[in-house]
Image: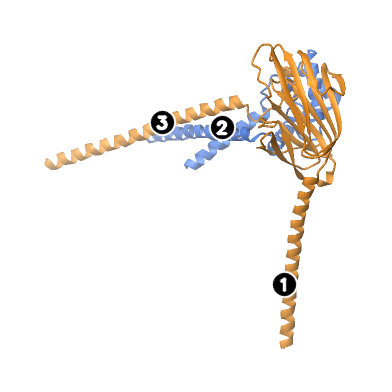
Chain colours: A orange, B blue
Amino acid sequence: MNTKIRSQKSEVRSQKSKNKTTILFFFLSSVFCLLSSDVFASDLRIGRMKVSILPEYDSQDVLVVYEGKFSDKNAFPNQVTFTLPKGVTKLTDVCSLSPGGQHFCQLYDITDKGEYNETAVKLPYSDFFIDFQYSPFKVKSGKAERDFEYAVKSLYPIDTLEVSIQEPLRAEDFKISPNPMSNTEKKGFRYHNYTYKEIKQGQDVKFKIKYMKDNVKPSVDIKFSVMSKQGLIEQNRGIWLLAAGIAVLIVFFIIRMRKTHHKGTKSTKEQRLDFRQDIQDKTG
Amino acid sequence: MKIKIFLLSLAIVSIFSLIKYVFYQSAGTDSVMGISHNLACPCECPMVLEDCHMSCGMEWKDMIGQRLMAGGNRDDIEGYFFKRFGKEAMLTPLQRISGKWYQITRGGYPLSDIILFSAILLVWSGVLYFIISGTIDFLKKRIKT
């Protein structure tokens, strides 16, 4: 009998230890997976990246588009980080493209890193597409010179980096340095192109752009801009709508308060009258 | 009761705003965005062309722009897309709803816009709440008298 109980107990113990081993195994493997994904994140490499810089394309700002693909598609989904020029606080799009061609636009965080800003994005696939506007120069009106520097800085090594700078329409004395490797004409625009191989992690590739323009009109009327997009709400209109709503709300609130106050005072008056009536009745 | 009225107001304002956002065309019909409001994204995804910034969608937007500049109007351009790409290029109301829902749920908007939109919803729900509760009070008084 005793031996039976003992053997049962030992079975239970061995079962428990097996369970513990399984839990420990799962715990360790999940920790390993997490750690290995971090390793992947730091070991990532961009196969091809194209940076398009379009000064005053459909607004008075500079439109910048990053398109590319990470070499190791098996490392995704993964969190990646891109650098942005100082002053960029809003991105127009941060998307990943599935092999089937589906968009996966992502939420993003922008952090200030001193000399530049950084955006951390979780990409489901290795393809990426980012576009944003930034204002390196402020020209209000009249003939003025635009002079700015754009630095392409990648936190990952890049096998092939292509940079294309669009010359704004009606720009005069357009100068860029370094000298472009090739020039192309496409749909009425002149592009200055560069191709670099084997860009190291953190390496800066800088471009100086300088030109004159008579006015602040962008190259393309927003009506014909391919970059135009419907927002959830138009910022200026939204702020006005919110302000109007708050004003109406305050008016309603005041009316309500007055009404309740009025009701309160009326009832005390009525009480006083009743009280006087009682006294008069008692005194006869 | 107050909470119920507020929730009703919030639901009414939210539904109204969503319908406006999904179906209302804010851009003019003589603009790329205005015309791409009625076209599907060609990138094998459920998006509406006006929200699409990928190269395949930009090619279509570019075609619209060129046709507009050449003097085409909305009907001509939509007709061209229908003839060239078939009915898949045109959006049905259901496709539009799913496309816009996709855009919202994929985080296609900056946080500041979402906060502003939510604040507007809450404030105008409050306004509607006062209107509804005021009307109820008024009707109650009338019934009493």
Visible residue check, residue B49: no
Residue B120 got which mark? 2
Q: CA distance from mark 3 to mark 1?
A: 69 Å
User: Mark 2: which amino acid?
Assistant: Ile
Amino acid type at image mark 1 = Lys
Question: How far apart are the two marked residues, 3 and 2, measured between alpha carbons?
Answer: 20 Å
The x, y position of residue B131, in whole percent, is: 48, 31
The answer to whether residue A13 is visible is yes
Residue A251, by quadrant, is: top left
Query: Disc 2 sits on a residue from what chain?
Result: B
Image quarter hosting the C terminus of chain A: top left
Which mark, by number, is residue A16?
1
Query: What secondary structure is found at the residue carrying circle 1?
Result: helix
* Residue at image coords 34%, 34%: A261
Q: Is residue A208 left or right of residue B145?
A: right
Residue sitting nearer the eye, A113 or B14: A113
**Percent position (x, y) of residue A29?**
77, 59
Left-right relation of B56 to B133: right
Same-chain check, marks 3 and 1:
yes
- Across and down, in percent, residue A237 comes to 59, 24
Against A196, is A58 above or below?
above
Q: Residues within 10 Å of mark 3 (few under 14, many from 20)?
A: few
Same chain under badges 3 and 2? The reply is no
Question: On the image, which quarter does residue A233 sit in?
Answer: top right
Q: Which residue is mark 3?
A: A254
